[in-house]
Amino acid sequence: MESVTYRSEVVEVDFRVEGEYISQTHWQPAEYPDYIIEDVFYNGTSIFNILNEDDLEEIHDKLIAKLEYC
């Protein structure tokens, strides 16, 4: 689980990783793992069911940005 700031509030994102990083070769571009959001919590309460697709995409982008810079 990882914390991200979404709409000025800290939410906890429960996610899983599918795949792995495979470095670029001369013939193939690099491949990156997929981060699949399984649940989102605010103050200990799941808010996953009330988030729309755009909300989840924004949280996903923030999660990836945070994980890439750790």
Image (spheres, helix red, strand yellow):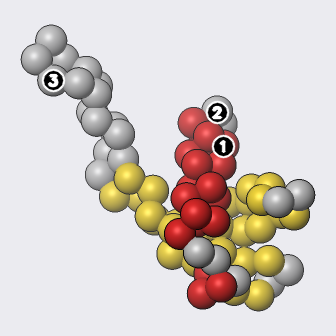
Cα gap from disc 3 to disc 2, whole angstroms: 24 Å
Q: In this view, does 34 lie above or below 22?
A: below
The answer to whether the residue labelled 1 contacts the one labelled 3, judged by CB atoms less than 8 Å apart, is no
The answer to whether the residue labelled 1 contacts the one labelled 2, judged by CB atoms less than 8 Å apart, is yes
- What is the crowding at mark 2: few (fewer than 14 residues within 10 Å), some, or many (at least 20)? few
> Mark 3, mark 2: which one is toward the viewer?
3
Q: Is residue 48 above or below residue 27?
A: below
Cα gap from disc 1 to disc 2, whole angstroms: 5 Å
Q: Which of marks 1 and 3 is nearer the N terminus?
A: 3
Inspect the image, locate mark 3, and give the three-letter code of the amino acid beneath it: Gln
Element class at badge 3: loop
Give the percent coordinates (x, y) of residue 63: 62, 51
Image quadrant where residue 51 sits: bottom right
Element class at badge 1: helix
Inspect the image, locate mark 2, and give the three-letter code of the amino acid beneath it: Tyr
Give the percent coordinates (x, y) of residue 41: 72, 78
Give the percent coordinates (x, y) of residue 30: 28, 28
Inspect the image, locate mark 1, and give the three-letter code of the amino acid beneath it: Lys
Mark 1 — residue?
66
Element class at badge 2: loop
Give the percent coordinates (x, y) of residue 25: 18, 17
Image quadrant where residue 10 sits: bottom right
